[in-house]
Amino acid sequence: MLSTMQDGQLSLANLLEHGSRVHATSQVTTWTDQGPRRETYADLGRNAARLANALRSLGITGDQRVGTFMWNNAEHLAAYFAIPAMGAVLHTLNIRLFPEQLTFVANHAEDQVVLVDGSLVPLLAKQLPELKTVRHVIVANGDPATLQAPSGVEVHSYDALLAAQPDTFDWPEIDERSAAAMCYTSGTTGEPKGVVYSHRSIWLHSMQVCMTDSMQLSPADRALVIVPMFHAMSWGMPYAAMMVGASLIMPDRFLQPKPLAQILASEKPTFAGAVPTIWQGLLQQLEAEPQDISHLREVVVGGSACPPALMHTFEERYGVPILHAWGMTETSPLGSVARPPAGATGEQAWQYRYTQGRFPASVRARLIDDDGNVLPWDNESVGELEVAGPWIAGAYHGGADPEKFHDGWLRTGDVGKISPDGYLTLTDRAKDVIKSGGEWISSVDLENTVMSHPAVAEAAVIGVPDEKWDERPLVAVVVREGQSVTAEELREFLSDKVAKWQLPEHWTFIDEVPKTSVGKFDKKRLRAFHSQGKLDVTHF
Ligand code: AMP
């Protein structure tokens, strides 16, 4: 028996029309070197229509791909809506990719047009001759004359192009399962792989972002979107904000601790999202120049494990709770969120909040051991996490890397355990696990414990070869400015916090942990530094 219900399409055109009308007065604020620049959601709707008309005039039809090479700002936001709503596919290009990776992804996605920020023109210009399918470049917030384009590529001014267009667009009816946007995974191994989101997956994911067991976005929020729009769709915040009318604050290229502190002081956001390294940097800034940040009702931290010490400092010193969440480009990215269960208080609540969190109803999860067996949720059995659901990738663009998917499940490459009440604790990336004498040592646990020492700003742990034990942990430590600590003192500090056999005997002090293009610890490079003998290691 079929239901008697209608089957309305969950399309981004509908989302844009809804948000720009119903939440017409909600604001988008973009930070500039002159301070804030503001527009309303009604303006955003009109600009999206102008951009769609402009792209049509450049010949964009069907599901052609339009790339963006942009910071988080109002123009990027207009592209986020205009491109999918007109039926084309938004491809957010990561501005921090290595040149050859940028060329690979733009060619692989067959981008026809690239929207570039004026400040990023020199970066794009170098690669442009290699981008085989690009016919038009639109320069926003800058002078198009600064771009020397290869023959066959036309350069346009965003402002001039849009000024000539009507501010309405006859948005087409779109099948909710068609492609809306694509994002390549940062790919620390092999070529980057394209994840293609549908209108439906983005819509359902946006609803989840707003739900009470997730980020709880509401019309009362002013959300500071620090996580780049080219990284896992800014964790879904732009689309979710449009759904409920939360105002958005876009930091543009001002991502360093000092300007971020200025943005906080000026705009007083109620919510923000970023990887742990951003918050570590902000903390140091706040320590140097204290300011009230209690306007933040909560900040979401994910992308890598959030050190408990960071959560405590934010909450106890600044009154701002950190919400820990796990996700991947392949999971749109919201996978799990660490809100404690009803009734948990005090230390018990903290223990829940340290975890990577619980899965929402739409995300199924399981743990698999080396032999392919499904493991119990007993908070002890450790295996690879697999997930499935309506906003989880079922394949990569062009069928790349098919072994990441099987029986309708995505192999995440993350290793951990799940408690009987459904809380995930990740102990490692599969490739970062340290195997010592047949036992696993969690690099994440060691990092978190070392980072709870007051003199430590950052700590990254990698496995190094060992004749007797196969592998042993090496700790790379970044000491806080103005502080000092020795390897001996840190070992002593760990001695009552980790099992004796896990106590690291290899230590090195570095100025900075190398980071990936999206700000995570780059352990591949750290391992390379070690194998090339570039680290000055103390052994015990
Ligand atoms: P990306 O696709 O670049 O967002 O990277 C996804 C990967 O980041 C995941 O597979 C995890 O390894 C890691 N990750 C994301 N969130 C967390 C978290 N809360 N704790 C630990 N690792 C995380």
Image: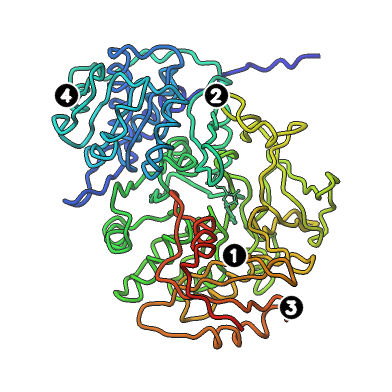
Q: Which residue is mark 4?
A: 160
Between discs 1 and 2, the one toward the N terminus: 2
Q: Residue at x 56, y 72 (%)?
A: 475
Q: CA distance from mark 3 to mark 2?
A: 54 Å
Residue denoted by label 3: 501
| Labels 1 and 3: the sequence-earlier one | 1
- Mark 4 or mark 3, which has the lower sequence index? 4
Corner quadrant of residue 387: top right
Spatial separation of the CA atoms under disc 1 and disc 3: 16 Å
Figure quadrant of residue 292: bottom left
The disc label shown at residue 462, or none: 1
Q: Position of residue 430 (x, y in %)?
A: 67, 53
How many labels, in total? 4
Image coordinates for residue 174, horizontal then vertical, percent: 50, 16
Judge from the rendering whether residue 491 lies leftward or rightward of residue 512; answer left or right.
Answer: right
**Disc 2 marks which amino acid?**
Leu
Quadrant of the image containing the N terminus: top right
Query: Label 4 CB, ligand 1: below 8 Å?
Result: no
Q: Residue at x 55, y 56 (%)?
A: 304
**Which of marks 2 and 4 precedes in the sequence?**
2
Disc ID at residue 10: 2
For disc 3, the neighbor class at 10 Å (few under 14, some 14 to 19, many from 20) is few
State which tag comes first along the sequence, 4 or 1.
4
Secondary structure, mark 4, is: helix
Q: Position of residue 186 (x, y in %)?
A: 50, 43
Q: CA distance from mark 1 to mark 2?
A: 44 Å
- Depth order, front residue of 361/183: 183
278 up-or-down from 393: above or below: below
Task: Answer few, some or many: residues within 10 Å of disc 4's Cα (few below 14, many 20 plus, some between 14 and 19).
Answer: few
Above or below 203: residue 503:
below
